[in-house]
Amino acid sequence: MNKEIEEKIVKTFFVKSIQRRVLFELSSLHKRYDAFGRRNDFLRTELMFEIPKPNSDPEEIEKLLKKQGAGTMCYVMTSAESDIDGEELPLTKALEELIWSGLPFIISCIPTKLAFYQGEQAYGPPQRFILKR
């Protein structure tokens, strides 16, 4: 885990009133996965741009992110125990591994400017957003 990157992500994209709580949860292995156990209301809505359905093609999502300035590498924060949680890895690999999981996650392309968020799957496909500042 890279606390510095995660703090930038939280302070950029999360609602101010919940930032301290989320940073606490992210810092604890026991509570880390609670950080995503909320509805989308923990993110700053003015920075959220929903990707219209169908929106489950990792290649298309990667193209959208690259149009917004994403590079080839990213940082992953996920709600489930995963080998790639807290890792920096190629954007293509992160999207391919996580897009079909049905679990909430954030892929940070530029920590203070651009990310991809997938909400928790309830009924039908999960909501997917580009987070851009």
Image: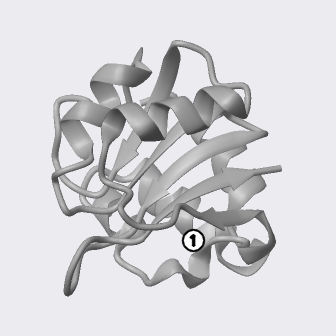
Secondary structure under tag 1 reads helix
Name of the residue lying farthest toward the front = 54
Rendering coords of residue 15 (x, y %): 72, 74
- Which of 83/103 is in front? 103
Rendering coords of residue 64 (x, y %): 58, 38
Q: Which quadrant does the N terminus fall into?
A: top left
- Which of 58/81 is in front? 58
Residue 3 in view (yes/no): no
Rendering coords of residue 84 (x, y %): 25, 30
Residue 29 in view (yes/no): yes
What's the residue at 30%, 72% (across, down)?
120
**Which quarter of the figure has residue 96?**
top left
What's the residue at 32%, 30% (across, down)?
94
Residue behind mark 1: 21
Q: How is the image coloured?
A: one colour
- Which of 87/74 is in front? 74
